[in-house]
């Protein structure tokens, strides 16, 4: 005959169970810039470089910069 204690995996005696798994603490939050951040920064830098290049070719950016320098100087 099977005793009721043996039917279920229950620690009735209060002794530590060697098969019981311990809950690991959560990993620390990630710090720094990961690969996705580096790719995003590279894409943003390339986009801003192309935009500045286009504005310099049109002469619009140069006029704004010269006007800003004149305002700051005088």
Image: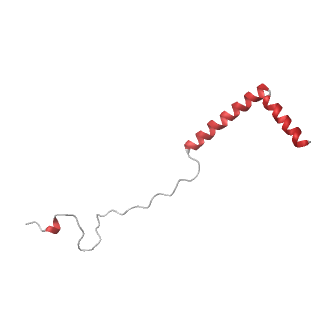
The answer to whether 68 is drawn above or below residue 14 in the figure is above
Q: Is residue 38 left or right of residue 11?
A: right
Q: Is residue 23 left or right of residue 6?
A: right
In-front residue for pair 66/42:
66
**Quadrant the N terminus occupies:** bottom left
Q: Residue furthest right?
A: 74
In-front residue for pair 37/63:
63
Q: Residue furthest left?
A: 1
Image location (x, y in percent) of residue 50 = 69, 30
- Residue at 69 percent of width and 35 percent of height: 48
Q: Is residue 57 left or right of residue 39?
A: right
- Residue at 66 percent of width and 33 percent of height: 47
In-front residue for pair 58/5:
58
Image location (x, y in percent) of residue 25 = 43, 61
Image location (x, y in percent) of residue 7 = 16, 64
- Residue at 30 percent of width and 64 percent of height: 20
Image location (x, y in percent) of residue 46 = 66, 34
Q: How many marks?
A: 0
Residue 24 lies in quadrant? bottom left
Residue 41 lies in quadrant? top right
Q: Residue furthest top?
A: 58
**Quadrant the C terminus occupies:** top right
Q: Is residue 74 left or right of residue 56?
A: right
- Residue at 53 percent of width and 53 percent of height: 30
């Amino acid at each position: 005959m099977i005793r009721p204690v043996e039917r279920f995996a229950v620690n009735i005696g209060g002794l530590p169970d060697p098969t019981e798994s311990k809950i690991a603490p959560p990993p620390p939050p990630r710090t720094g810039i990961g690969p996705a951040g580096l790719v995003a920064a590279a894409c943003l830098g390339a986009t801003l470089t192309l935009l500045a290049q286009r504005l310099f070719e049109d002469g619009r950016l140069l006029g704004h910069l010269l006007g800003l320098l004149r305002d700051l100087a005088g």
